[in-house]
Amino acid sequence: MPSPFPLLLNFPDEILIRLRRYLTDDSDSRSWRLVCKDFYRVDLISRTTLRVRRIEFLSSLIAKFEAIDELDLSICPRINDGTVSIFLGLGFSRLRSLILSRSSGLSYMGLERLMRACTGLEMVDMSYSWGFGDREAAAVSNCAELKEVRLDKCLGVTDVGLARIVVGCGRLERLSLKWCLQVSDLGVELLCKKCFDLRVLDLSYLKVTNESLRAVASLPKLEVLIMVGCLSVDDLGLQYLEHGCPSLKELDISRCDGIRPYGLTSVLRGHDGLEQLDASYCFSELSTDSLYWLRNLKCLKAIRLDGTQLSSAFFDVISVHGKYLVELGLSKCNGVTDANIIQLITRCIGLKVLNLTCCHSITDAAISSMAGLCQKLMSLKLESCNMITERSLDRLGLYCSLLEELDLTDCCGLECLSKCSQLLSLKLGLCTNITDTGLIKIARNCKRIYELDLYRCLGIGDAGLEALSTGCKRLTKLNLSYCNKVTDRGIECVGQLEELCSLEVRGLQNVTSVGLTAVAFGCKRLVDLDMKQCQNVDDSGFWALGSYARNLRQLNVGCCGVSDVGLCMMMGNLSCLQDAKLVTLNKVSVRGFELALRACCLRVKKVKLHASLRFMLSSEILEILNAWGCKIRWD
């Protein structure tokens, strides 16, 4: 039989590899591999990134994909010192990026062996690794060629550990220390003295003071500075930045309570090349001086001022001087009116992202004008804008053909949105007037949707979900919590969504194990399931989860009808499970919890239990969980 793609098969591999790189969606990539043997071969030789779910398959995968330079092990159930030896001889010297996020079972000894094997490593991500401390930081410092290190919420890292990385990795260009609460001014000062090539620095939620900003101001190449929630920094610190960081393009000072408009003015005065600014929830309103210097930002592309009182003068400045503006965040801002928005969009016609969450004065007038003028709009958030009706949303559907993300939580309208055929994300939580009729139209016309939020949409039932299962095959994230009309028939339709990764079905009283079994069997890619308060689901449903939903990583089964047998079987079989919420399971005994935790203790990283179990579970199981780096949250 002749090939259906004779022309493509005559192309050299270089052309096919270039075509393959344009496919970024997982489903498209799988389709490519299934076309023919030549396409499959091109996939093998061209893929550069690999995300592994099971460590036992790593050897064969590395051998199969020859061009891999980025390896993501963040979703492996348990990486520890013992498993390191499995892949030390796999040619890891060619790796450039290694993601070990949430690898709480890996100690400094295993990490040191791994780092010494990855001689060409340029990026390492150890974020949310609970056991990561100064000794582990010292192990990472063995990779002298590192250009990027991510240590978000590595709570054990102190100035000593940071110093080891700084001294050993002097070529650092990107560093994230978000939530590293033991890092102080001393560590940041040493960082700035040693790493002059730093371009991106995240100090969010650190207990640093103005002295850190004095040091940061000396960095000649810094382009992005993120310092969300740095409560000990004030206007004096921003004054240091005024005459420093000549390359600064992006600044995030959101939730820095000590900063006032005067401090912001200092930064604006010294950096007319700033492209992105986030000053959300810092101060009550902008000063006249801030507005004066804001107009000098000729290259401004994005500004977020959530929670700020805005005057008409602000909109005058932005509308006249913000010709390159692409993103504007005004969530929970007072002073936002139809007239302001119309004035803004008349000039800033290149807007692609607009957040008007909780701007309660916005009406159809502003949205109708926006639809006609901002035809490049891709993301629009209108949560709790209760004065908007279907009349303006209909115009939005007609003219904003590029719209991909729309948040109408606690608003109205649905049928008219079916005209937005390019929608990727649609949030309709708390829209009580949404019915199956509108959902059916969405399913027919919005084929590209991958995220749909129907939280507490009480008018949605089985008929709408049936249409969704046939029309929106690309859905990866679906929220049906408290949609009380949904029964097993509707959930069985959800089971036909093969791409589904995240599903929330909280409080669905009409759903039983029959529906859950259909989801477990049909949604093989499911990684996150929240079925709290599904009281009519019994052991048979949990048996199905344990048997078929083998990729589940996060699970919430609080207030369900599972017993000892069902819980133990499920927890023992879910080999990828990392985060489990097991609160208020009235049919499960203390011994049942004990056995279930023993069955998964070598891989689970977080577990939430009722506080009463703290004194009832044996000290042995608690010690085992702690030894393997599992965090227990007592509810």
Image: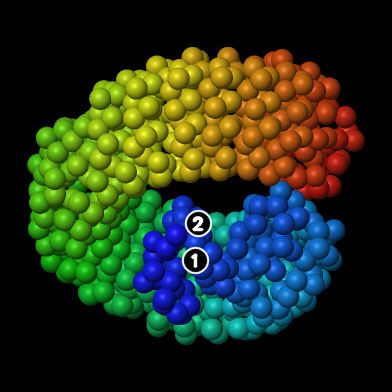
Q: Secondary structure at mark 1?
A: helix
* Identity, as a three-letter code, of the amino acid under mark 1: Phe
Relative to 184, 518 lies left or right:
left
Q: Visible in this render: residue 233?
A: no
**Vertical order, 18 against 481 (above or below):** below
Identity of the residue furthest to the right in this view: 620
Residue at x-position 22% and y-position 45%: 420
Residue at x-position 59% and y-position 19%: 513
Q: Residues within 10 Å of mark 2 (few under 14, many from 20)?
A: few
Q: Secondary structure at mark 2?
A: helix
Q: Residues within 10 Å of mark 1 (few under 14, many from 20)?
A: some
- Distance from label 2 to label 1 (Cα)? 8 Å
Between 497 and 243, the residue placed more toward the observer is 497
Give the residue at mark 1. Answer: 39
Kindly indicate the quadrant of the structure image that contains residue 438. Answer: top left
* Residue 34, numbered circle: 2
- The quadrant in which the N terminus is found is bottom left
**Vertical order, 543 against 143 (above or below):** above
Residue at x-position 10% and y-position 51%: 372
Q: Visible in this render: residue 277?
A: yes
Residue 413 in percent (x, y) is at: 22, 31
